[in-house]
Image (spheres, grey):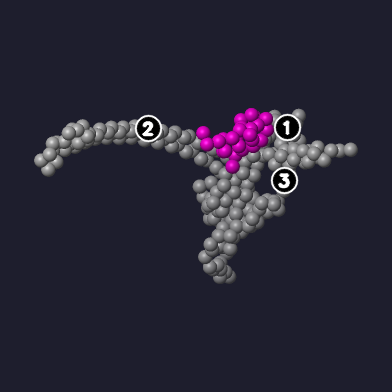
Amino acid sequence: MINRSTTIAGLALCSLLSGCGALSRLSDLGRPPSMTPITDPTAARDYRPLTMPMPPLQQTPPDLASLWRPGSRAFFKDQRAAQVGDLLTVLVDITDNADFENNGTATRTGSEGMGVPSLFGLKQKLLSAASVSTNSTNSNVSTGSTKRTETVTLRLAGTITQVLPNGNFVVSARQEVRVNSELRILQVSGIVRPQDITGDNTITHDRMAEARISYGGKGQLTDLQTPRYGQQLMDIVLPF
């Protein structure tokens, strides 16, 4: 017969393991991490369509006598992505360098003295009690330095997942690369204008509004470089 306390302890252990992600890590024990299957981004549980402020939609009346189609770069067909499901290439080239240095020095010295040798013609019996002298010295030296260098270069294909009422595109790009037992995950999403898409059907990250760029992964190296959950909890809770 199974003890009730043993059942409760087992359930608590399972909930703890599932909450900290240990079960998913145990499933990859002895084998490389599995890749995520290719799915529709709009079918994800955390997917939410975007709602942005939009100007009034103004449709250009077609010119029946013209062979040129508005927005086209060719007479017959525009090869750039233009509707939901079309593909385009996202170029990410970020090189950030920051170097800050602040130095401050503050020094203050004060001295005050006060004495009452006589009061209304009467001599004080205790001169020490009638004299007050104060001295103060304050010194503060502060030095701060910040140096940061970041370089991210990515090139991956994305999909138009939504066309906003003003004609802008919502683009989502995801790529997974597995090398031995390490899985690298690249994700880029944002809003682009159709006219910013170049003739070779590419878009740069600096032309994307609300850009979200993620480069990470999971695997044995990531596990070694990531602090344990207990250590992360202690770093958040402990005040010292």
Name the amino acid, label 1.
Pro
Residue 198 seen in render: no
Residue at 50 percent across and 47 percent down: it is 206
Identify residue type, mark 2: Thr
Q: Which residues are magenta?
A: 214-240
**Near-viewer residue (174 or 58):** 174
Amino acid at circle 3: Ile
Judged from the image, the secondary structure of the residue bearing numbered disc 2 is strand
Farthest residue toward the right? 1
Q: Residue 227 colored magenta?
A: yes
Q: Which residue is mark 1?
A: 32
Quadrant for the N terminus in the image: top right
Q: CA distance from mark 2 to mark 3?
A: 51 Å
Q: Earlier in the sequence, mark 2 or mark 1?
A: 1
Nearer to us: label 2 or label 3: 2
The span from disc 2 to disc 1 (Cα, nearest Å) is 47 Å
Q: Nearer the viewer, residue 224 or 77?
A: 224
